[in-house]
Image (spheres, helix red, strand yellow):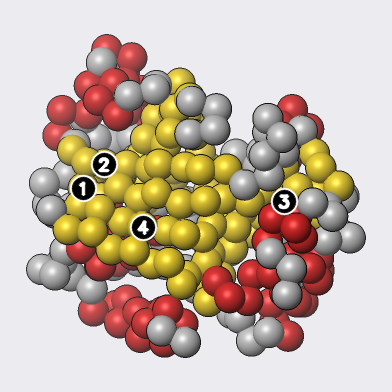
Amino acid sequence: MNTIENILNHYESISLNDTDKVRLMNRIDTKYIFNASTLPLILESIKDSFFVLEIKNKRIQEYITSYFDTSDFNMYISHHNGKQNRYKIRHRFYKNDNVGFLEVKFKSNKGRTIKKRIPQNSVNEIYSEAGKAFIKERTPFNADELKVSVSNVFSRITLVNKKLDQRLTIDSKISFSGFDLQHAGSNLAIIEIKRDKFSTESKITEILKNLRIYPSGLSKYCLGMVYLNPDIKKNSFKPRLLTINKIENA
């Protein structure tokens, strides 16, 4: 089978400026977790329906993400307990571009995700005047009560459908670190479908359904916490974790 890089070379490319038109900062997200060995087949199947983001002649981007939480892991517990109107605070560094952002994601009780961000190249800039003001304005938290709990490194492919109303991110080669531990989920891949209006009519959802890959609402932050913190509450995630374990070891 062709390598991922070879398959992506057969895609039409799209620039970052054009991709920004489909940024969908207020959107509905759907995640799918599957064994990375299936990724070439998926990419081959949808190549005529999507553009691939190309930056500086590269179609696979490298990301480093650090997640902030309180000392009692308020944001993780809110996600675990299914709380509506919850937050995620993270710093994301784009290695290919050598730029970073402090980001806040808000999941509303309507199921929509709203993301806001400001440029900050360093993780510790959250404690700067600008970082503190941003956190205070966008969340119920204070920056001083937050610290990095889990970090991850991964490779990302970004696809945009040719109607320019849907964006896919495909993450693989994911590794986690935190609590003086590391976990490499090298066999996992995560597709996230981001769209402004919920619709089941999509080439990618059809392909995934045919491959028996179904939605799974476990974020990379929660996955990292479960992998690295043996004492963290995880009961409500157990069915999904069993499925992920089977996928990872398939």
Percent across and percent down for residue 78 are 28, 58
The amino acid sitting under disc 2 is: Phe
Task: Categorize mark 4 by other alpha carbons within 10 Å: few (<14), some (14-19), many (20+).
Answer: some
Q: Amino acid at mark 4?
A: Ser
Looking at the image, is mark 3 or mark 1 earlier in the sequence? 1
Mark 3 neighbour density, 10 Å: few (under 14) some (14–19) many (20 or more) = many
Task: Confirm or deny contact between disc 2 and disc 1 (CB under 8 A).
Answer: yes
Residue with the mark numbered 3: 159
Circle nearer the viewer, 4 or 2: 4
Dividing the picture into quadrants, the one containing residue 246 is bottom left
Query: Where is 121 relative to 165, above or below?
Result: above
Mark 3 and mark 4 residues within 8 Å of each other at the beta carbon: no
Q: Dot 1: what SS?
A: strand
- Which residue was labeled with disc 4? 175
Q: Distance from label 2 to label 3 (Cα)?
A: 28 Å
Provide the residue designation for mark 2: 68
Q: Nearer the viewer, mark 3 or mark 4?
A: 4
In three-dimensional space, the C-alpha distance between marks 3 and 1, rounded to whole angstroms, equals 30 Å
Q: Which residue is mark 1?
A: 149
Q: CA distance from mark 3 to mark 4?
A: 22 Å
CA–CA distance between discs 1 and 4?
14 Å
Q: Quadrant of residue 16?
A: top right
Q: Is residue 237 visible?
A: yes
The crowding category of the residue bearing disc 2, from other C-alpha atoms within 10 Å (few below 14, some 14 to 19, many at least 20), is many
Q: Is residue 221 above or below residue 65?
A: below
For the point 14% across and 34% down, which residue is it? 145
